[in-house]
């Protein structure tokens, strides 16, 4: 109660760790850190036309809280589209959200009481870890192999928790398609088994399918949701296919979950204006052709990146070839100081994300994530070349 | 662990109370419940043009996570505009949000640990009450009179809390301009005193200024923020002037608050595409002329409504003439069953919001909120006429 700067107690769960996105470096550098789609394939002209058609006086409700025709158009399109992944859901199971991120946040808030436990893949999407922490969760990571989450380990951990009277997870967060950061995809049988475990142990699965549309090879697989619609919260997004700046995605979940999410969002739909634009676009647009453009480009970029990694790093960096998505996950020999390698690489003008933020436990694991979606092949090759130089530099200075 | 529908424990703080917005009734009814701007004054043609200019290949970053030029244009415009309310802030004190609602939610999450106390005006904005509950707050209401929050009562309550060792509020939520629902505006001296109490007792003020631009009469007053920038979180929005469907507003707050809010939002700006459109619009648009159009129309509608209330309800409904905003708050004689009056009115085809949701304690207080912004004068008159009939019906059936 004096004039000095007061000491004020904020919410204890909010830590000021860095969660910002990488800034755009100078144009000479190679940016392999961004989880961004390729700018040249973002359909801004189509979105421009859709805005011109949708934002008209006859649809002025676009500017009201609940929107005009757009939200229903987006919902119908999405529910139809998701059949591709074995999802049969009605409007009571659907909620539009500001991208998959808001879906993660709402799921965490709806499901978790502080102190309860979430299981994730280790490694996993770092922003999901932040959101689970904000919700007061205890986070435990379970191992991922070349086929994604190791379901044997999930099953034994669940059994052990029951036997020892330990905490079952409130939900398991998983990315079955082209996991961020490892790029792994779960085979059909693992999806089915995971769904079965959710039913058996009465837990939820939070299935983040941000990258599911971006399969370069092989057949699309049914979602985990398709095997246990009562036990799975499925997240989709337009961020990877039309542009993250739209901030629009969807949740498909049991109605008891959706109702609670609606309550948290005050029943206010996200960005009605964006939904008007997208509603018009989706019904006048060849989305499959867009997916084909994206997957063709990303497949070529993945190939350019893996080829460069083989030639620049050889046996030093192991990886599993991702069948889709944005990312290549490199495993360096055990004991490699990835943070140091990161600094040496940045000095040479190549950016990526070292392994640490993808683990709840942090540490300095010998992994790095490279993104192949954002940069052209020349920049990818230049970046990996510099990474190779940085790695040799790192070895020389050991 | 059997096949029956599982019993699952959700977050205990999320209650399934109705928070939805009123649905649009049949066209013959009078809708005085919506806190909506007048559709005929929403500048959809200008927004259409702005979208055409802003969503172009040269600004394709509009579709990326962090946006293109838009967020900076909106920020600069907003910081300049807010000088009108005595706010001198720099970019470290600014955060773009999905409307004032997200500002309330972030403030609650940043400031509150579960079980801590928030003071609000009683009555207050119902969605704020929901968000405080979701954050685990204990809510106490302090009385509002014709000049808004009663600062004498705030001061004595703070003194008493200190003397008795009771809980000081983590923050006080207040709408100094044309409060929702009462329409009251706080005079200059109350603002200054409230700011002084925040400093003296080391608490925050959450100043929701959703309606501040919509003053029909009298001079604009400085914000509470202007008297205590270290102790106030100020919320503004484009919802009442350009359209709620844009979902864009701003927070002005001490940097230590803003940094925590950025952390919670994963440093991802709201709706980059919307910010591109608005950034372009705001720099090519006569915003003051829009404000003049809005305040002229709303002043006339307020007058039509108060005149109708005087002639249809006479002494039965007391009110303070609001000098701005969207709402007229009617006080019926003590003991009036506002819920019953509400049902009788809806049967006659007029909708409004009864007093109960505006109080943390609920109950059935003898108040109703009428909205004059959304409907034309003819509908306002028809609606108040039906309300008068419903009230006489209510009295006859006592």
Image (cartoon, coloured by chain):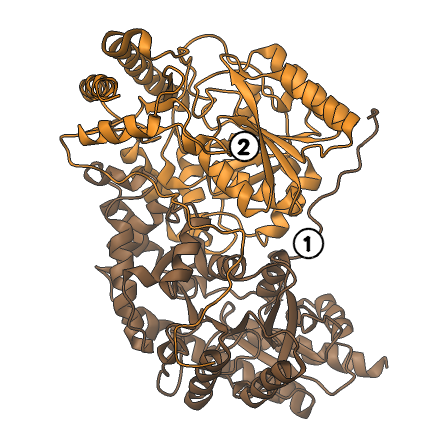
Chain colours: A brown, B orange
Badge 1 local density, few (<14 within 10 Å), some, or many (20+)? some
Dot 2 alpha-carbon crowd within 10 angstroms: few under 14, some 14 to 19, many 20 or more:
many
Please state which of residues B382 and A104 is positioned toward the viewer in this rendering. B382
Front residue of B290/A74: it is: A74
In the displayed structure image, the side of residue A143 where residue A193 appears, left or right? left
Q: Residue furthest left?
A: B28
Q: Viewed as shown, does residue A336 lie left or right of B114?
A: right
Corner quadrant of residue B232? top right
- Snapshot quadrant of residue B3: bottom left
Residue positioned 52% across, 52% down in the render: B66
Label for residue B235?
2
Q: In the image, B102: left or right of A56?
A: right
Instruction: Name the residue carrying label 1.
Output: A13
Q: Nearer the viewer, mark 2 or mark 1?
A: 1
Q: Are marks 2 and 1 in contact (CB under 8 Å)?
A: no
Q: Position of residue B125 (x, y in %)?
A: 46, 31
Chain under disc 2: B
Could you say whether the residue bearing mark 1 is in a helix, strand or loop?
loop
Residue A100: % across, % down:
46, 62
Q: Position of residue B172 (x, y in %)?
A: 62, 30
Quadrant for the C terminus of chain B in the image = top left
Image quarter of residue B355: top left
Chain for numbered disc 1 = A
Q: Position of residue A224 (x, y in %)?
A: 41, 79
């Amino acid at each position: 109660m004096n004039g000095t700067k007061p000491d004020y107690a904020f919410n204890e769960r909010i830590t000021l760790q860095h969660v910002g996105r990488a800034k755009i470096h100078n144009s000479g550098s190679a940016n392999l850190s961004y989880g961004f789609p390729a700018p040249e394939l973002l359909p801004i002209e189509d979105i421009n036309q859709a805005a011109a058609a949708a934002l008209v006086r006859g649809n002025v409700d676009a500017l009201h809280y609940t929107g005009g025709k757009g939200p229903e158009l987006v919902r119908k399109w999405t529910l139809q589209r998701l059949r591709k992944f074995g999802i049969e859901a009605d409007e009571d199971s659907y909620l539009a959200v500001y991208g998959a991120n808001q879906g993660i946040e709402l799921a965490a808030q709806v499901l978790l009481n502080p102190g309860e436990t979430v299981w994730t893949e280790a490694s996993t999407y770092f922003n999901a870890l932040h959101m689970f922490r904000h919700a007061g969760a205890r986070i435990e990571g379970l191992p991922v192999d070349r086929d994604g989450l190791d379901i044997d380990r999930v099953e034994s951990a669940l059994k052990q928790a029951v036997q020892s009277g330990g905490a079952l997870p409130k939900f398991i967060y998983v990315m079955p398609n082209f996991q961020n950061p490892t790029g792994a995809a779960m085979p059909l049988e693992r999806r089915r088994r995971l769904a079965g475990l959710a039913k058996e142990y009465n837990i939820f699965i939070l299935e983040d399918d941000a990258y599911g549309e971006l399969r370069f090879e092989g057949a699309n697989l049914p979602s985990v949701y398709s095997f246990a619609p009562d036990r799975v919260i499925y997240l989709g997004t337009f961020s990877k296919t039309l542009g993250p700046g739209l901030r629009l995605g969807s949740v498909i979940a049991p109605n008891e979950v959706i109702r609670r999410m609606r309550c948290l969002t005050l029943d206010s739909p996200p960005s009605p204006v964006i939904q008007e634009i997208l509603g018009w676009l989706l019904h006048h647009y060849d989305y499959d052709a867009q997916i084909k453009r994206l997957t063709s480009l990303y497949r070529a970029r993945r190939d350019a990146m893996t080829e460069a990694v083989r030639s620049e790093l050889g046996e030093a960096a192991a990886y599993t070839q991702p069948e889709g998505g944005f990312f290549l996950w490199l495993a360096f020999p055990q004991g490699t100081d990835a943070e140091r390698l990161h600094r040496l690489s940045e000095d040479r003008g190549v950016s990526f994300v070292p392994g640490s933020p993808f683990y709840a436990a942090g540490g300095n694991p010998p992994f790095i994530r490279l993104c192949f979606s954002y940069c052209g092949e020349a920049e990818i090759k230049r970046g990996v070349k510099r990474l190779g130089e940085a790695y040799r530099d790192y070895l020389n200075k050991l």
